[in-house]
Amino acid sequence: MKRLIQGAVLASSIIASSFTALAQTDGGTLVYLAQPEPPTLASYVSTSGPIGLVAPKIYEGLFDYDTEGKMIPVLAKSVDVSADGKTVTFTLQDGVVWHDGTPFTSADVKFSVMEVLSKVHPRGPNSFREVESIDTPDDTTAVFHLKNPAPYMLRALSGYESPMVPKHLLEGTDIKSADLANNPIGTGPYKFTEWKKGQYIRLDKNEDYWKEGLPHVERVVARFIPDASTRTAAMENGEVLYTGYNGIPNIDAVRLRDRDDISVTTDGYSMINPMALLEFNTKEGPFTDPAVRRAISNAIDRQFMIDTIFFGYGKPASSALSSSFAATDLYKPMPNYPAAGDVEAAKKILDDAGYKPDGDGVRMKAILDVIPYGEDWRRAGEYLKQALGDIGIEIELRYEDVPTWLKRVYHNYDFVMNLNYFYQLPDPVLGVHRHYGTDQIRQGTHFVNSSRYSNPKLDALLDAGAKEPDAAKRSAIYEDVQEILAEDMPVVNLFEMQFLTVYNTKLKGVYGSAMGPYGSFSEGWLEE
Amino acid sequence: MNRSTKILRYVLRRLMQGIPIIIAIIVLNFFLLNMAEGDAVDVLAGEAGSATPEYMAELRAKFGLDQPLPVQLMVYLKNVALLDLGYSFRHDMPVAQLILDRFWPTLLLMTCTILTAVGFGILLGLLAAINLNTWKDTAISIFALITYATPLFWVGLMMIVVFSINLGWFPTSGMENIAAFYEGWDRVWDIAHHLVLPTITLSLFYLALYTRMMRASMLEQYGQDYVVTAKAKGLTERRITFVHVLRNALLPVVTMAGVQVGALIGGSVIVESVFAWPGLGMLAFESLFARDLNLLLGIFMISSVLVVVVNLIVDVIYSFLDPRIEVA
Amino acid sequence: MSFWKRFARNRQAVLGMFILALVILMALFAGAFYPDDPFRLAGKPLAPPGTSGFLLGSDSLGRDVASGIAHGAKTSIMIGLVATVAAVFIGVIFGALSGYYGGKIDDALMRVTEMFQTIPSFVFAILLVAIMKPSIESIVIAITVVSWPGVARLVRGEFLALKNREFVQACHTLGMGDIQIMLREILPNCVSPIIVVGSLMVATAILIESGLAFLGLGDPNIMSWGFQIGAGRTMLRSAWWVCTFPGIAILVTVLAINLVGEGLNDALNPRLRERQ
């Protein structure tokens, strides 16, 4: 299975190197799949995935990131961080205009961060929490004054995460219901033209784009096809050229991978860092005892789930943190995460903790709630039901629709075990802390600490980890964090997910961004 | 009282009867939907990734979801009475506009489906009746049953695999070629091209019904006295079948078709999903899971109104076609 | 018996009856052929039919498709039967009261019936299942709710036709109560059309269940053909057997039920005519 992934990576790097050698051609229509259809295009109030597939073509951020995580200038030419880390100065591009012709200035940056992202964006208040004020000495300079150093802020500046929005259209309106939601005006390479609900969103080339000679493509169309098999068929037929976030099921991606005209890549998701996991109710029900949760973590054959459900795409989790944090030396592998599962060890933990099986071999019964985001998760639930049955935990599965499930898990806390996935994002402060901190037990807020796990020792470590500028010290702090979590297991991490992008090789130049499908496609072009 | 005033009074009476039905449908669905856990704000916040309870409370107040249920219902009914279907907060758009956008594609697909199913159903039913109790009759009835019993999505997907991937005759899905943006007659042709596969798939399902009805209706007519008379007069079998029996046998089939057009306005979730056809069925499906109450109620209301109206039209036409049937 | 003779004369109906009997036997003896839980991960995932000891192949988690079909037969037939019995029950009550009493009662009950006929039925079924959360019970309830109005209309028609017949009038003069007349005298005389409609409804119910499962609204804890289709539909192109065999099971069963239904119709209707 590893070989497959390497193959895919290799294939994409060949393409990356071949497109620089070829002359880029202008024109053509780039049709790609966005699934499901976004409700609106208000990326400044929602980080909803489908919005992210479309809006970053229209709105840009200050920076983009390449696949190695290096910052690529977009609306900001450069950034300068002062020695104490508390003053961050952005120098903006010259001659940028909004799609309606109004010039883009540092006032837009100030407004976007202070009035929009810090106030109504779901993650903005966290990313920009240290920003006290922004000075705009001239039209192309924005100086951020921070209360404390916030190195993670510089990882959250992409067009998807922190879009720059037009002050002249939003100021004085109710931002949450502004007309802009359905008639977006940005600075990006493509302008919004038309939205036929249930069919497509059409974007046309921005003739006044600030980057010389770009974009190449005349028109970009995001198409909506509800059925996965039909999406695959449309890709095979060349009707669509690109889709990300498993828009095409893995089983089909594996089949299409071998075709000459279609390729598959796992690049473009490193800023997302998704982790599949089980959340437990640590306050009531059968899983209040950490020993039981440890036993569950031991019982699961993570590699089997990856191989059968995701067709080899994924990596067994081995700690509370994703192994991709190894790049910043924060990740350490921990015990209690056997990749292929260890049923005997799991049984022993339960025996030792005093959970004896009855005549039918049943030690306890529980309901497993399953995230309602597609068939793959149902298969995962069905696997878990069998695997936990093997160690004497009898599971009943419960599938509900999105609103019911959200209410149950994050509002009513009416669950004992929940199959879910979280984005760990580029830094633990942004994506992991929300899952474990006592301050993150926020009833009614989605995707935070629904386990209601609370450990003062851990809270102190998380707090220190957020503020520690020294890399080595930070690494030591997070090692302690991972040790505690591997022992207490309020959440059992299952596997690091690998999303797939499936694309027609005719489409070039859209693979270099760490944002992948959430990128701007500004350099995309079509062969022929 | 002459016939036309009689019909007019009949129409008015039926419409008056329809109004309480539609109000009842709204009320029933309103309470059903409110029994479901979670609301539109939960969905929006869940999709957005994260939102504070304060922010969500603010949104609820804006959407009017913080009001007591009876108040919300009254506000909705009042708006409907003023022909205002309300606003979809999810789409940030008026419900009427969202429904209208999807209405024409739905109507197009459904009309073509019914025409195809009725056309072939009549043909097959006729053939079966003429060749009663021969192998042809058996083959036709088995064929019709098989098309009815095969799961729709399977037929749809096979259609796509065979006719668009392997043979390349038709596009896989959608209503228009969106790389081209055709205009004028090119666009009409393009839409027709996209319409073929979903129409065939959906009409296969309804084919069995019409085939069976047509066959039964033909057989019933054969047993009527006028056929015996015609035979006695020495008319040929052919002439009797095609001139007399056929005409009379068509009536119930065509009536049924009319009634079904009404029922089909709600769309077909499965065919729309497989062929990415932008119909009302998928819109209703999505709005249910997004708890977009105004939109879903709007769809239910519009389709109910259409069912009432179409049924009425069918009954009136029927009374014209067959003077033995009295309205009222 | 002349009924059985008439039924047996219809070769298609006999064939249908034979297939249906096989399906019912399969449902009854599923546990004997496949004693294990059909959800058990039995071996190699996505094994094609006839390999790795799987007669009809295995699905993506290595579950036996054949075992699923055998165990699923029980669920699918159960859903069909229970939903139909429930729908017939409600339909008969509505139709009988409406047809027998007429007037205001008829008006009121028929308005309710019309209301349920006016709502787009499949979308309404989806709504009911989604609200009650997907389970066997909610699926049965949803199918019942969208199916009963047809029965009610039929029964009302029959009651309207029969209530003025001499034998009913005779019962009135004998001083029989309304309920007794309805249950003992009129209802037995409209059993045959109800049986015909009911048999077809079982088939429709099985189809609705598979449609709901296609949309992800099946019961996750009980094996059914709809469940198998839902689990296999995305892999139709790569592993055709996972949802094609359950699809064929549905097709064959629905076909058989329809053939039997038509046979019943042919065999029962002459009797009705004879009496008239």
Image (tube, coloured by chain):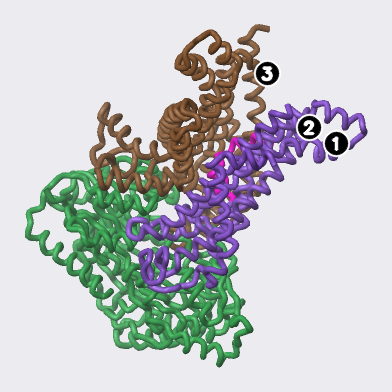
The answer to whether tags 1 and 2 share a subunit is: yes
Q: How many neighbours does mark 2 have within 10 angstroms: few (below 14), some (14-19), or many (20 or more)? A: many
User: Mark 1–mark 2 contact, CB under 8 Å?
Assistant: yes
Which of disc 2 and disc 1 is earlier in sequence? Answer: 2
Q: Which chain contains the residue that carries disc 1?
A: C
Q: Which residues are magenta?
A: C112-128
| Residue C118 is inside the magenta segment | yes
Disc 1 target residue: C178
The answer to whether the residues at label 3 and label 2 have Cβ atoms under 8 Å apart is no
Quarter containing the N terminus of chain C: top right
Secondary structure beneath disc 1? helix
The kind of residue on which mark 1 rests is: Asp
Q: Which mark is residue C186?
A: none
Q: Is residue B306 left or right of residue A314?
A: right
Chain represented in green: A
The residue to which callout 3 is attached is B328
Q: Is residue B293 magenta?
A: no
